[in-house]
Structures are given as C-alpha cells and as structure tokens.
Amino acid sequence: MSAQAIDSTPAASGRVSVLVETPQHSGLGGPLDYLSERALAPGSLVRVPLGKREVLGLVWDAPEGDDTPTAAALKPVLDHFEGLAPLDDGWRRLVAFAASYYQRGQGELALAVLPPALRDDTPAQLARRLKRLAPKPPKPARKSARKPAQVEAPAAAPPPPVLPDLSPDQQRAVDDLCAQLHHANPKPRLLFGVTGSGKTEVYLRAAEAALAAGRQVLVLVPEINLTPQLEARFTARFAHLLPAQHAIVSLHSALTPAQRMASWLAAHTGQARLVLGTRLAVFASMPELGLIVVDEEHDPSYKQQDGARYSARDLAVWRAHGLRIPIVLGSATPSLESWQQAETGRYVRLNLPGRVGGSLLPRVRLFDMKALPPQAGVTTALTAPLLAALQERLARGEQSLVFLNRRGYAPVLHCGECQWKSDCPHCSAWRVFHKRDRTLRCHHCGFTERVPRHCPSCGNADIAPLGRGTEKLEEQLQEALPTARILRIDADSTRLKGELEAQLQTVHDGDVDILVGTQMVTKGHDFRRIRFVAAVNPDGALFSSDFRAPERLFALLMQAAGRAGRDAAGGSEAEMWVQTWHRDNAVYQALARHDYEAFARSQLDERKTAHLPPFSHLALLRAEARTEQAARDFLKAAAQAAEAISGADDRFVYPPVPHPIARVANVERMQMLVEASQRARLQAFLREWLPELLLLKRQHKGVLRWAVDVDPLAI
C-alpha cells in the first residue's frame, strides 16, 4: 500500500500541475495543467480558473510520462498565496495514499480536507488572517513625567501542575512511549487498559515528552462532545509549557469556519504545538509532528460515512509509519483488527489491567427478564427490581446512569383498529414520536409533522406509542421516583451550543441523581459520583445481520459499565445491571467477567472460520437511484464488468442486495459486496474496476450516484 513518491522541488515557471476539487463521476481525479509565470513549489495554494469559475487549487507534481498540451493552450494561474508556506511532503504523501487506497480523486480529497474558508479567501484576506494569528509584541507602558517608559513584561506562565503518582503499569507504558520518541522506526503501540485505568494520564506524559523535544502532538478523539473536556485537561496540564495563544487548538466540524481556519493555520505554521480533534484532524498540516494519539481507537466514528470514506485511525497509523514517529492507540475494548495486529506482532501491546487509585471494576449483574412472573408489564424497561436498586442508590446519595440507545419518546405511533403505524412517506423507516414538541420525526431524512389527533387511515382517536426511547424512559423514571433529580442527555436535549457542556457539568457537580442517556454518555466521560449503571434494552443488537454487531455491543456495554465506580472513595460497591432475555449469550457472559481477551479470541476464531475481516478484505459498492430496479441493474452490470478483470479466482463478488434501510428521501439504495483474500489484490482489482464503473454510470441514466467503500464498517 505504497503511495506515489512526492517531489518537493519547485516547479519551473511555465506549465504547472494543480489539484482542484472535482466530483468522482467526472473522472478528473488527478491534477490539471495550468500556466504559471513564477516557480511554484508543490503544496502551494493558488487560485485558478475552472470552467467559468475561479476556484482554490493546490500545486501538485505532474504525473510521470505525462503527455499534456503545450503551454500556449493552458489557462493561467490567477493568484498565489505567497504568505503561506507550502503543504509539506508528509502531508501530500498522506493525501496521495488516502486517495489511492479509498479510490477517490486526489483533488476531491485534498481540497475537501482543507478549511472551507480557504475556498473563498483571496491571498490578501489570508495575509490578514495570518497577521491576526501572529504573536503580539509586548505593549509599551505609558510615559510618565517621573519615570521613563518601560516595556510591559509578558505575563508569567503558571507554575507546573502537581502530577499524580503513576501505577507501575502506567510507568512502564510511559517509559516505553518516551523511548519510542527516539526510535528510528517505532512500531504502533496498542494501549489496552480497562476503563478508569489512567490511559489519559499516559497520553499526557507521552505528549509532554514529545513537546519537550520540540515536536507537535496530534490527539484524535471519536466524538465532538469529548473534545472540550479533553482540551480543558490538556490545557490545564500544559499551560506552563505552552502559555502562548493558539498553542493548543481543536479541529472538528462543530467549529465555525473562522475558528476552524484559525486552528488549521496555527497548526500549519507551527504555532499550535498540540492539536485535538475528531477524524478530520488526521489531515491537519503539522510540519513538526512527533506523536499521534488515537483515543478509543475501536470507535466506528473514526470511519467517514460519506464522500471519501476513510478511516482516520488507519490513516493515522499510516501517517505515523511514513514519518517514523510513535503512535499510540488506546482502548478498553480494542477493535478486533487492532487486537489481531498486536497478536501477530505488528503492534506492541501495553497493558493497564487495573484501575488507578485502587477502585474496582463494577460487578456486572445479568438480570434475566424471563425470571420475572408472567404478568402485565413484564416487558417494561423499568422492572420492580431495577426501581428498587435505583431507590437504594438514591437513599445513599449516589448517582446512577440508565442507558438506552434510542432517543425520542417512542420509535413508532400505532393505531390498534387498523394497524396504521407512523411510517415515513419518503423512507423505508418509521417516524419517531417526540412528546416534548408533539412531533413525528424521521431520523433519516428529517421529515417532521405534528402528531395527528386521529389515525390518518381510519380516524380512530386512540393512537398510542409503541416501544420507548430516552424521552419516555425519563418520564417513567420521574413518575416512579418523584423525589429524584433526573437529567436526560441525548442528541435531542443537547442541540444548542453549550448545552452538552452545561448538562455534563451539572452531573459532575452532583446536582443530578439519575442520568438517562444514549451512547453519548457512555464514552470517555469521567463521572466520579456514579456508582450504578443499568442497560435496560440491549438485546436488539444480538440479532443484527452485521457480523460486527457483537463486537460493537460488547464495546458499548463495557464502556457504559466503565462509567461506574471510578472513584475509589465512593464507599459502596459499584454495579452494572443488564436487563436481558438472553443472559447465556456469549457477549453477556464475557461482559460479566470483564473478559475482553476471551471475547476477542472467540470472535476472531469465528471470523477466521467464516473468512471475515481481519482475515479477508472487503469493499462495498453502493448505488442510489430513483427506482430499485435501476440501482439493481447498475450493480449487476458492475458485477459482469468485474468478471472480465483478471484475478477472478482471488475474489468473490456477492449478489446485489437492498440496504438495510432501502429508501431514504425517496432514493432507493442497493449495495454489492466484494471480498478478497489479500489487500493488495483487492486494491489492484478496484483500480481496474473504477474506470468501468464510470462508463457504466453514463449508460445507466437512472442511477443518481454510486460510491465504493473500502473496508466498510456497516454491512
């Protein structure tokens, strides 16, 4: 999986190759040729004409043996961002590799990962941004008749913080990572630590060593909502080392265009020494990068689900290998791909088997729903034993977390007379009932209507919700425990800016007795007061058609359990309840023992037998059309084209099937899976197949769009 070599020599005046953003279906994935009056180094940003538009371009290296028009036939480069240093070789190699591996155009990917504000800026506007970003000189004091004018001394840096004592396991991990900073070709490190084992402290110590060596540090997190708390922790730790403004910055999609531009420029100019961000931050331009940290590396959020469907975790590993710098992947439940890499010796595993401070992992109780007496209400999420356990924790003044991974009040409204259900007219999905604003809302296309007073089909006034979401769970808890202070945190309750941070702070301050939430509250949060966690309805994931569903469910429940008992001084034993109808399932049995290693061995044995990743390699061709038949015909033609490509014995093309949610926003979706035994052979096949797909798209007019997803996570 090697990328084409990148030459950093400035191009001579005359013809110059430039990447521009072009859609995949155009077939213009490589650089275009323009005429330049000056020598431009690869990586320079320019403005060029494209059709009738003026667009942002990135100077690239001309393909070897290129047969292009003479300079007289070329359009000129219109302007050059001369105040900005060119994007370096390492960044360009990363983009070239990502575009090749994920089968996207170089221009499409390169321009998409740059700050959106760059597309509209002129060189003069960018120069003003750089001027505002530059460190401000100290202000001279006002002149006085008695005393001569003096220059104000810069503000004193805060004193170094008092560092916590490391456990022996933490110390071994820190020593290993610090040694890797000076290694000529370090291997990736998989930091396997139980929840609450102090993985963040290991990251901080390794980052401190890299910063002290004059290097930049990149820290990736899976969720935007984890960025502020991690940024606060890193800022508090390194305020004495990095007192300058913009020395620590965040990069994620929730930033305004101006904020994202400022953070990107600070990283590119070297002013930012530490960058924290979500998956898009893997493409941050950091010319002095010396360490990469990927927290919660198992999280599927690291995989982009539209456009160039890249894995930020895998690209981070590739980037570290190309730069020969250390990378640490941390998780209590590593992805099976990363675990297998450690088992085969490609990664080095660092273990943190115990929690810091002497706290114990919560005891996991698998509550068998079949043991309850057969009576009305037996299927409810709030069983009598669970309510009793919550009441007991409430009496002790302890916090509890009730976890249900479904937002809204109920997943569907139902009419008992004619069996009408609140389906979405534009999607093959139900509209979710949200009681607070009395709406039916499709979580796929966004179509929203007020709840009807009568059944739209038969006029029956008695329509009722079926199932439950977090909104209904919150209401039922409030009715059952009227004295409890209950807070719900999900995507609906945290829509406005700052709401999530404020609600999390309320939990940390102890002003909440019972926290109700989705997976948003199970990842990475250090709740010191929670002693009890309940997962009320996790069985649905056991019957998913996706082979990764058991792995995801185990990781989600382990992370949820990890929110309990993080403070050793809490007093009572921390506990997690899992209400299930299938307590003997292997996922739950491994969870009860906190035995990830046994779970991983079992899952890897199953996947090896079934020839599933990481023992095979997959690509998924998705097609979207106005009719199911148009999408199916396109995929069948693609399968026929695949048969004509050499090496058919080394791969298997499965028949086309509908997407699990086949219709979204009146668009039908189909998919077709390609499996190969070796990654290199799959890549070679895809390189030959994609030009055929471009031709097929022109023949199948009913197809709206298609895309190839390499290493898909959702099947």
Image (cartoon, rainbow, N blue to C red):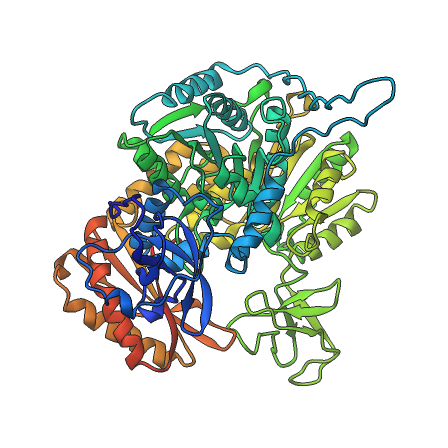
Instruction: Between residue 222 and residue 471, name the one nearer to us.
Output: 222
Residue placed most toward the observer, 82 or 504: 82
Q: Can you say whether 638 is above or below 129 in the image?
A: below
Picture quadrant where residue 321 is located:
top left
| Rendering coords of residue 580 (x, y %) | 54, 47
- Above or below residue 463? Residue 237 is above
Residue found 60% across the figure and 17% down from its top: 163
Q: Is residue 308 left or right of residue 693?
A: right
Residue 379 image-quadrant placement: bottom right
Q: Quadrant of residue 651?
A: bottom left
Q: Is residue 371 among what the camera can see?
A: no
- Looking at this view, name the residue that lies furthest to the bottom: 458
Q: Position of residue 406 (x, y in %)?
A: 60, 55
For residue 375, side relative to residue 126 (left or right):
right
Q: Quadrant of the C terminus?
A: bottom left
Nearer to me, 322 or 401: 322
Residue 69 location in percent, x, y?
A: 23, 67
